[in-house]
Image: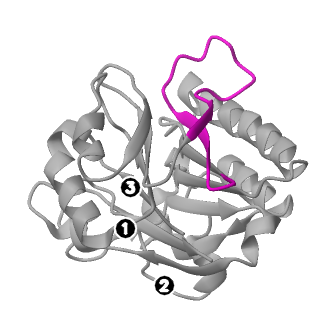
Amino acid sequence: MKIASWNVNSIKSRLDQVKNWLEEHSPDVLLLQELKGVEFPSETFRGLGYESIAVTQKAYNGVAILSRSPIKAVSKSLAGLEVDTHARFLEVIIRDVRVVNIYLPNGNPIGTEKFEYKLDWMDRLRGQMKRWLASDIPTVVGGDFNVIPEDIDCHKPASWIKDALFQPEPRARYRAFQDMGYVDAFRSLHPDDKGQFTFWDYFRQAFEHNRGIRIDHFLLSPKLVGRLRSCEIDKGPRSLPKPSDHTPIVLTLD
């Protein structure tokens, strides 16, 4: 089972790139984040053999899951805050696996309500992840976490010291997910690999000089860890004209 995740930074702007990538790589499941619009091209993806479910929002956020197999929708919002209208969460069941797509809040600037919202969102996610552990259904949580877990996950830590993605509070919460038993699929297979990033800024030739960060992740529940075979970052789409600032990360399970 091949599951990919990609923050496309506008599905309207990157639709052709996503179509081409699907045709070339044929993942079983694709998680998309930052759709940035209320319209989602489900018919286009159906023509490529994918059913889809999307949670959209005008101009901002938005997540979707594409699958070659039937999708059973479970939840389109993260529990714990009824007034939260951000389109950032989608939980489904595909082939007896719980697949969760998240677009975790950025949180910048620190010291503001946006940062507090980020931390609260992570706390709510942790509560939900704890409940999933009590279930018999194996779980994969993927997407744009907007967290740089460790110093190895960025080109130059000093450049991110004042950024919400690098603050001790979200990093501690990310480690708490792992302390619960969830495994960072990529880092578990590449424990010492430096320079492995999923995001590069558009400015100052960050991609060309590989000045990036790793913020797109897959976390696997203990029931899935034994099925992990690979987790790789595909830099190809980031090198295209007018790319997303993120690139796909691809997980393979038995």
Give the CA separation, mark 1 to mark 2.
11 Å
Relative image position of residue 33 (x, y in whole percent): 41, 43
In screen coordinates, is 247 left or right of 229?
left
Vertical side of 86 occupied by 133: above or below: below
Badge 3 vs badge 1, beta-carbon distance below 8 Å = no
Task: Decide: few, some or many residues near mark 1? Use Cα within 10 Å; few <14, some 14-19, many ≥20.
Answer: many
Q: Which residue lies furthest to the bottom in this view?
A: 192
N-terminal-most mark, 1 or 2? 2
Vertical side of 55 occupied by 97: above or below: below
Q: What element carries label 1?
A: strand
Task: Decide: few, some or many residues near mark 2? Use Cα within 10 Å; few <14, some 14-19, many ≥20.
Answer: few
Work out whether residue 175 can be spotted.
yes
In screen coordinates, is 11 left or right of 190?
left
Q: Which amino acid does label 2 sit on?
A: Lys
Residue 157 sits inside the magenta stretch: no
Q: Which amino acid does label 1 sit on?
A: Gly
Marks 3 and 1: which is nearer the front? 3
Q: Name the residue under label 3.
A: 6
N-terminal-most mark, 3 or 2? 3
Give the CA separation, mark 3 to mark 2.
21 Å
Magenta range is 72-97
Kindly indicate the quadrant of the structure image that contains residue 30: bottom left
Q: Mark 2 points at which residue?
A: 194
Q: Mark 1 points at which residue?
A: 212
